Amino acid sequence: MRIVVTGGAGFIGSALVRYLVNEAGAEVLTFDKLTYAGNLASLRAVEHAPNHRFLRADICDRQAVAAALNDFQPDRIYHLAAESHVDRSIDGSADFIQTNIVGTYTLIEAARHYWLGLDEARKASFRFLHVSTDEVYGSLEADGFFTEQTAYDPSSPYSASKAASDHLVMSWHRTYGFPAIISNCSNNYGPYHFPEKLIPLTILNALDGKPLPVYGNGSNVRDWLYVEDHARALHLIAGKGRLGEKYNVGGRNERRNIDVVEAICGILDRVRPAREPHANLIRFVTDRPGHDYRYAIDASRLESELGWRAQETFDTGIEKTVLWYLDNDWWWRPLREKVYSGERLGTAVGAG
Ligand code: NAD
C-alpha cells in the first residue's frame, strides 16, 4: 500500500505518518511545504525507515503535485496540508484561502488526472481522504451534537476555508466520480503539538512560570481527541469508509477550556511541583472574536459502521501529553525560542 500524506510534517500528519510507517507497514511519501507549522523533527521516528520518503513541496504547485504522484504511484492520498490556526486566520486570511482552498483544488485536480490514468483495478481501489474539521459546522449551544447531516455554518476565516475545501472535494466526487471521502474531527491534542495551541501553550508557559491565558471566561467547550486515536481513525476511514460520505471523528471528551487548563496544572503540581500551585498563573484574557461556544461530535457512524473506538480518555491522554512535553524539550525548545514564544494572536486588531 503506497500512501501520500500531505501536511505530514505537521501535528496530525506526523502522527499519521509515524503510525502508517511504523505500525501499518505502508510505503509513505510525506508531501509538505514546511511552513512555520511543519517540522521535520516530528518525523525523527521514521527518518531512517526504508518505507518513508519526504518531499518538500507546495500543494498549490500543480506541476510539483503531478510529478510527485506520477513518480510515487500512490494507492491513496491522505490530505492534511492546511493552514490550521484560527487565531492566525483572524490576523491574516490570505494563506488560508491560498492553501486550504486553492491548494485543495490544485491537489484534487492533479489527483483526478493521475487517477484517470490508472489501470481499471488500481482506479477502482484508489482513495482520496480529505481531512477536515468539526468547525465547519459552526457553534453548538449547551446541548446537542454535530452529526454528518449538520448544516455547514463556519464562523472564522479558517473554518470557512475548510468548509470551502470540503465542498470542492464532495463536488469532485459527485461530478467526476472521484473516489473521495471526508473526515471531520474535533480538537486534537497529544505529542508534537505546535506550542501556539491551548494545551501545549499551557504546559510550556506553566513550566516557565509564565501566565496561562484563557480566552473569555473559560467556559467554551471543546471535544478533545487524542491524536494517535485520530491517526488510526483516518486510516480506517480511508480503507473501509464509503465513497462520497463524511465521517465525524471525536473522542466523546467534552471539556471547558478552564477545566483543561486546570487539569494540566493539577498534573504539573504532582509531577513538577513549583513554589505555588500552577493554577495561580491562570489569567482570563479578551475573548477570541467570533469564538464558537461549543463543539461536540457524534461519532456513532464511525463507531457503528467501521468499529472505531477512541483508546484514550481525556484523563489518560492529557497525562501522557504532559509527560511527553516534560521528556521532549529537544522538540519544543527550538520552536519556543525561534518560531513562536507565546505572544497573543488573533485579536483582530490590525488584521490584514
Ligand atoms: P498543522 O498546522 O500542525 O500542520 C499543517 C502541515 O501542513 C504543516 O506541516 C505545514 O507545513 C503543511 N502545509 C501548510 N501549507 C502547505 C502547502 N501549501 N503545501 C504543502 N504543505 C503545507 O495542522 P494539523 O493540526 O496537523 O492539522 C492537519 C489537518 O487536520 C488540517 O487540514 C486541519 O485543518 C485538520 N484539523 C486539525 C484539527 C486540530 O485539532 N489540530 C482539528 C480538526 C481538523
Image (cartoon, rainbow, N blue to C red):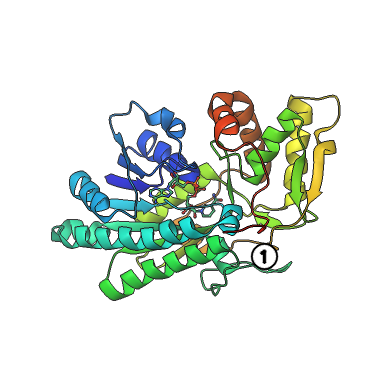
Q: Secondary structure at mark 1?
A: loop
Quadrant of the image for the C terminus?
Answer: bottom right
Residue 103 visible to the viewer: yes
Judging depth in this view, the residue of 194 and 228 nearest the camera is: 194
Residue pointed to by mark 1: 290
Direction from residue 97 to residue 197 in the image, left or right: right
Which residue sits at x=60%, y=39%?
A: 195
- Residue at 42% in and 70% down: 167
Horizontal relation, residue 248 to residue 128: left or right: right
Between residues 10 and 57, which one lies in front from this camera angle? Answer: 57
Q: Residue 31: x and y, percent?
A: 34, 44
Q: How many marks?
A: 1
x and y percentages locating residue 10 in the rendered image: 46, 42
Whether the residue under disc 1 has CB within 8 Å of ligand 1: no
The local crowd at label 1, few if under 14, some if 14 to 19, many if 20 or more residues have their Cα within 10 Å, is: few
Q: Three-letter amino acid code at disc 1?
A: Gly
Q: Is residue 92 above or below residue 329?
A: below
Q: Quadrant where the N terminus lies?
A: top left
Query: 308 and 68: which one is in front?
Result: 68
Q: Position of residue 186 (x, y in %)?
A: 57, 56
Q: Residue at x 56, y 40 (%)?
A: 194
Q: Quadrant of residue 244?
A: bottom left
**Would you say 27 lies left or right of 310 here?**
left
Q: Tell me residue 325's x, y (percent).
A: 61, 30
Residue 240 in sight in this render:
no
